[in-house]
């Protein structure tokens, strides 16, 4: 859990000009500096600060030898991490190399840094030496990791789901302008976060970062930046992450990514990453705890391992039957499935990503609640404890729906297939059916209490997303701008 702590940089270190060394260590570990002040501490204040602690008199005397610096840092497990980074306070001159005391101990003074001993001590230090206006959001970094926002939401709202939206960078200036209008409109719904995709091979990298930074600044809503390692050397990923950090972006989705347009299969560049796991590891190694890292989950199996049923050469198991995918119709129809063995390996790989530092899982689209339920159940059995957010794809047009589900080899329940085929020539009827199906799926997800929120793949469409929220009873207020032509808001509430 993210928290703040205080670290006193003692007068001996200030005299030797090593303040930036100490502060830099915390920043490189991913901590945000939310307060820093040079102090001349009186003896009475020093004695009060160390009252009841080991070697209190010696430590208080060291604190009043000259100016010191108090720094307030924010990040995951800040109190315990700062204590570990400092080294053993009872034997500072024998601290291991790599700790602050071990590296910066001068030999003439045992006092180098003094982190707060616990959360109460940190709060006492912050109150003692800082006014509320002198700390960022007082004592909270404004932008925080999604896993912490989710935990806070659940503690405040119980089973009421949060909402979040995904958008993609348009290809034209007019499209970007329209998206900015959409973001302003949808920000009224106070989503927990806004998600922005990253083009294959980094083709939209600058625009993605720009949209993230602008959306956060304009609407004060957390942003979640996709980052893919397709056709990118590690150095380019590092540059993108560094730029995101400079812009104050705290959350990313670490992805392998799709092959660039015109390239059929994914290929790693020479010396590059081979999978999302590599990107998760790299991000944690290079940027510590700064970024909240989200990864993808595949309720039906990754498309790369969804194979023709004929290749199995055996009857399908009960669980495979539930993941069975039919692509095409009539005589050209072909069936695909992710085998139980491949599905288990996929879950093992997801566990590796979480163990390497991923905080949350966001699933790819699905249209069958039972498929999602089975995925979550098996993920928990694998030891995956991270929040799992369902990715909800809008169903709005027959052509787009069939192309998308065919390309991704997504399971479409027989009932939905029948409804889609019956309405394929009726655009308005198909859209209404698709919205109704999506609302029913969302109701099942909320009723199951398996999910803390609903993540919508909006396809950059505001009106259709608003209609779904209206029917779910989650629309906070009527939009202040006109909907897309022909759209209306109507419906019921979650039952």
Image (cartoon, rainbow, N blue to C red):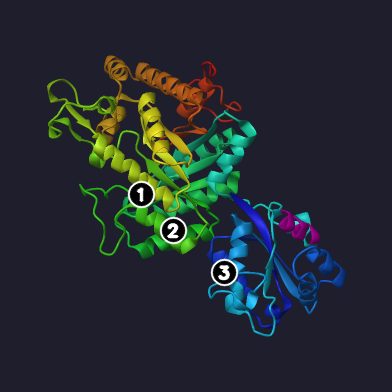
Residue depicted at 51% across the width and 36% down the height: 164
Question: Which residue is the site of mark 3?
Answer: 25
Between circles 1 and 3, the one closer to the viewer is 3
Write down the quadrant of residue 106 in the picture: bottom right
Residue 295: % across, % down: 41, 46
Question: Which residue is the site of mark 2?
Answer: 283
Residue 74: % across, % down: 62, 57
| Label whose residue precedes the other's in the sequence (1 or 3) | 3
The question of residue 271 being in magenta is answered with no
Above or below for 202 versus 18: above
Magenta range: 120-128
Residue 96: % across, % down: 55, 74
**Residue lying farthest to the right in this orientation:** 44
What kind of element bears circle 3? helix
Residue 436: % across, % down: 42, 18
Write down the quadrant of residue 64 in the picture: bottom right
| Label whose residue precedes the other's in the sequence (2 or 1) | 1
Q: Is residue 145 left or right of residue 417?
A: right
Task: Name the foreground residue: 485 vs 302.
Answer: 302
Residue 199 has which mark?
A: 1
Residue depicted at 44% across the width and 58% down the height: 283
């Amino acid at each position: 859990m993210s928290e703040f702590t205080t670290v006193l940089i003692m007068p001996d270190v200030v005299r030797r000009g090593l303040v930036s060394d100490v502060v830099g260590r915390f920043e490189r570990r991913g901590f945000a500096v939310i307060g820093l002040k040079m102090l001349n501490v009186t003896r009475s204040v020093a004695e009060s600060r160390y009252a009841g602690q080991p070697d209190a008199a010696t430590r208080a005397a060291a604190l009043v030898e000259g100016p010191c610096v108090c720094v307030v840092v924010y990040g995951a497990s800040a109190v315990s991490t700062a204590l570990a980074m400092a080294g053993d306070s009872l034997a500072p001159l024998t601290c291991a190399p790599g700790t602050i005391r071990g590296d910066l101990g001068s030999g003439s003074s045992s006092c180098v840094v003094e982190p707060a001993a616990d959360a109460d001590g940190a709060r006492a230090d912050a109150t003692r030496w800082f006014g509320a206006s002198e700390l960022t959001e007082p004592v909270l970094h404004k932008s925080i990791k999604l896993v912490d926002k989710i935990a806070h939401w659940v503690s405040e709202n119980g089973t009421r789901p949060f909402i979040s939206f995904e958008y993609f960078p348009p290809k034209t200036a007019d499209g970007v302008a329209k998206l900015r209008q959409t973001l302003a409109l949808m920000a009224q719904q106070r989503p927990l976060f806004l998600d922005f995709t990253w083009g294959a091979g980094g083709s939209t990298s600058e625009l993605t970062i720009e949209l993230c930074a602008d959306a956060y600044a304009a609407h004060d809503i957390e942003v979640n930046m996709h980052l893919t390692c397709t056709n990118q050397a590690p150095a380019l990923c590092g540059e993108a992450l560094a730029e995101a950090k400079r812009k104050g972006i705290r959350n990313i989705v670490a992805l392998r990514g799709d092959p660039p347009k015109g390239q059929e299969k994914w290929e790693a560049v020479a010396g590059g990453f081979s999978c999302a796991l590599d990107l998760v590891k790299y991000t944690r190694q290079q940027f510590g705890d700064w970024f909240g890292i989200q990864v993808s989950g595949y309720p039906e199996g990754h498309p790369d391992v969804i194979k023709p049923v004929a290749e199995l050469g055996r009857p399908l198991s009960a669980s495979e039957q539930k993941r069975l995918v039919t692509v095409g119709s009539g005589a050209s129809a072909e069936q695909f499935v992710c085998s139980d063995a491949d599905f288990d390996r996929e879950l093992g790989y997801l566990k590796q990503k979480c163990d390497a530092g991923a905080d949350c899982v966001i699933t790819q689209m699905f249209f069958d609640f039972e498929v999602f339920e089975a995925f979550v159940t098996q993920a928990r059995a694998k030891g995956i404890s991270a929040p799992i957010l369902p990715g909800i794809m809008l169903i709005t047009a027959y052509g787009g729906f069939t192309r998308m589900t065919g390309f991704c080899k997504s399971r479409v329940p027989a009932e939905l297939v029948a409804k889609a085929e019956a309405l394929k020539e009726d655009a308005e009827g198909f859209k209404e059916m698709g919205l109704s199906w999506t609302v029913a799926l969302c109701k099942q997800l909320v009723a199951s209490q398996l999910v803390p929120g609903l993540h919508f793949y909006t396809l950059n469409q505001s009106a259709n997303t608003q209609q779904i929220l209206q029917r779910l009873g989650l629309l906070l207020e009527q939009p202040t701008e006109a909907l897309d032509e022909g759209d209306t808001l109507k419906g019921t509430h979650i039952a």
